Amino acid sequence: MGLRRSAGLMTLLFHPHSFRAEEHRIEWPFFMFSNNDFEGVKPTTSKTGNAYTTNRNVPLGCDCWKTGSIDSECDVFECTCICDLVAGGCDQNCCCDRECSEAQRSRFEACLPEGPLNQETTKCYSTNEVGQINPKFPVSAQSTASSSIDRMLCVQYDNSDFRGTFYKDSDLLDKSSLDKELVHNELGYFKWKANSAVVVDSDYDAGELLGSAFSLEHLHIEAFGGNLPLPISSQLGECSDFALAQFAKPTSTHCVRVYDISSLEQACETGVLSSSKFAADLLLASYGSISATGDDWIHVSTQSVRWEDFDTGEKYLVDEMSLNSTSQVCDTFYDDGRVHSTSPACMPDWMRPLAPSCRNALVSIRYNLRYNGNDANKIIAAEADLVLTDVPIMANGGGDFVVIQQEYSVGFESATNVARSNKMANVINRTKSGNPGYIFGRPVLLGSSRSTTIGLSVISPKAQGLELLGSVADGVCAASRGHTVNFGVNVQSGCLLKLNRSELRDFCVGRGPHVAGNGVPRYFNVSSLLDASIGIFGNADPLDASQWLKIEIGPTPNLAAWEERSGTCKNAITSMNYRFVWTFVGAQSNPQAKIIGARVDFGTCDIKHFQFDISSRHKLGTSIVSTATFFQISKHPADYSPPSPPVAISVPYDVWYPFKIDSRSDTRKCTIGRFLSVSLSIWSLARFC
């Protein structure tokens, strides 16, 4: 039982237990930065029938604290579960996540910070002590049998009507306002990454290592020292094979491997670049501390295989028939042009580079692990998506070394059924970049507008968010490669257009494989910008278009023109520059980052080829770049206190006779209200103190 009074008084609470252990909470700063902790859950937009619109000021996951205000107008709000970063699934150690089952919560080792700090002070006393203070009217009566176990009276002090300091919510910027704000200084930021403790028991918990083994007839032999590796980039960018995958920690890494001609042949023959050891031959432990002789091992099945052109970066899906025809899916081998391998070829010979080459070398692998959250986090399925390539010995262009870019990633999906609704904004499975405000270092959400059959707009989100230009190993532009733009991180990315004089002329007049228009590189993907939107907050729901902001497109440069005599492409587009304006909203003690403006501009220059022979095959390398810059609007927060509550009772006009009072009814009510409030406060202190 309990008694709660309004602001300015104290709150009395009876706790059902004499002692309650405090929840252990690990430190987790709001400004979290980590490029490697995020691997987007591939979103789906097939459920467009669930489209809705809110047009509310209060972000999803927040509550309005302004008295008498509705969500569509409220600018004083608090956000109560910032650790909920997966829609449609349970976030490990996020105790406020409503999508977590009781079985999953029982496995939590600690609770991540949820958002607002508790401003109240609670002190507890035994009912016997309170009864001694006021023996005539002891506070010890119990109304039910179950409440007779109570032995504590708790007094919770909340004697101030002050509700905190809040940032004034900024409206989205129109085109003219955006231009003015882009003169601000750039944002400063710092990096932070949490240390994760690794504790292994019979069940998987967040952060624990994943057991791995190779199958040899009826025996299981430890693979990679017994745990699944996830190579990471060293300080020099080269792949380090000593990093390990961790349960419920989605991770994506990029690195390079550098070989000379002899070592590339050796790496190909010994299986260093083989995909089979990471997929077809690999087993994963379904739960922690499994023995090598146990039966609960999960085969890693190959879900898809794509082949990538080493020179252009273009990807092609491998025929499913070849996947089903052999257990050794497109395994790696060295082709010297004389000995034919029994390993199947992923692509027709006419698409592959000439020998000598390292065939079917691993470029990328993504593990998709499904687990049952109601059964001690047991892994029930493991799938792998592979990207392979042929590395020609002459890929070094006559140099001494060959550089191979690789990507390793692991994602997790809970098989536990969760309740879904538009109110919870979890109809679409996806990884959030904050809840609601963006977390520094998380991807900027990007999507394109679509219309449903009933006329509502939805967003088709891109799994990796906004990306800049990418390149293959030798720096040549590739449409299939990109660098993710992370919130708050100013970044520049570029690549090379290698064109001979004839190709440059075609590029300038809008012909050839490298253009999307006259002098416009197709790698900028300009056409997709016409309906592109970014998430205003990090938890923007694709089913509600009002939570997304359309990217403003700057003035379009004049069309490029070709000058035959000088071999110059005039006014070619060579740069693409994103600029974002953001600010803090919500409580000062728990600020939420909000993007309020986005714009993209293009830069031009003249590209000249110095070979006057039009038939020359000499290729000129021209760099094109894309950038992303973030600007913060700083605003001073303001204190907020709710208005005084209205008087709930009325009394006769002469109740205070012979005292004189103001004849105005509104003043009389206010005076009476204050007098009663003070009287009740004194009465409460007299009885319980």
Image (tube, rainbow, N blue to C red):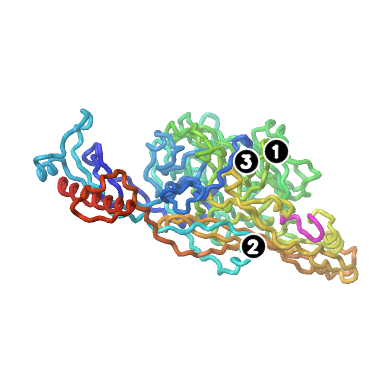
Q: Is the C-beta separation of discs 2 and 1 under 8 Å?
A: no
Q: Residue drawn 84% across and 68% down?
A: 568
Hey, what amino acid is under mark 3?
Asp
Residue 267: x percent and y percent?
63, 50
Tell me: 673 left or right of 197.
left
Instruction: Identify the mark nearer the N-term, 3 or 1.
Output: 1
Q: Does the magenta stretch include residue 522?
A: yes
In depth, the one of 554 and 683 nearer the eye is 683
Q: Name the residue under label 3.
A: 385
Which of the pair 543/92 is nearer the observer? 543
Residue picked out by circle 2: 627
Q: Is residue 164 above or below residue 18?
A: below
Percent across and percent down for residue 291 are 43, 34
Measured in 3D between alpha carbons, the distance from the residue under mark 2 to the one under mark 1, in whole angstroms, is 43 Å
Q: Start and end of the magenta stretch?
A: 516-524
Q: Identify the element where label 2 is drawn.
A: strand
Query: Image quarter for residue 575?
Result: bottom right
SS assignment at label 3: strand
Of the residues tagged 3 and 1, which is closer to the observer?
3
Graded by Cα atoms within 10 Å as few (under 14), some (14 to 19) or many (20 or more), the crowding at tag 1 reads: some
Q: How far apart are marks 3 and 1 (CA)?
A: 19 Å
Where's the N terminus, which quadrant? top left
Q: What residue type is labelled 2?
A: Thr
Say the numbered circle drawn on residue 343.
1
3 or 2: mark nearer the eye: 2
Quote the CA–CA distance across marks 3 and 2. 30 Å
Q: What residue type is labelled 1?
A: Ser
Q: What element carries label 1?
A: loop
* In the image, residue 459 lies in the stretch drawn in magenta: no
Q: In which quarter of the image is residue 581?
A: bottom right
Nearest to N terminus: mark 3 or mark 2 = 3
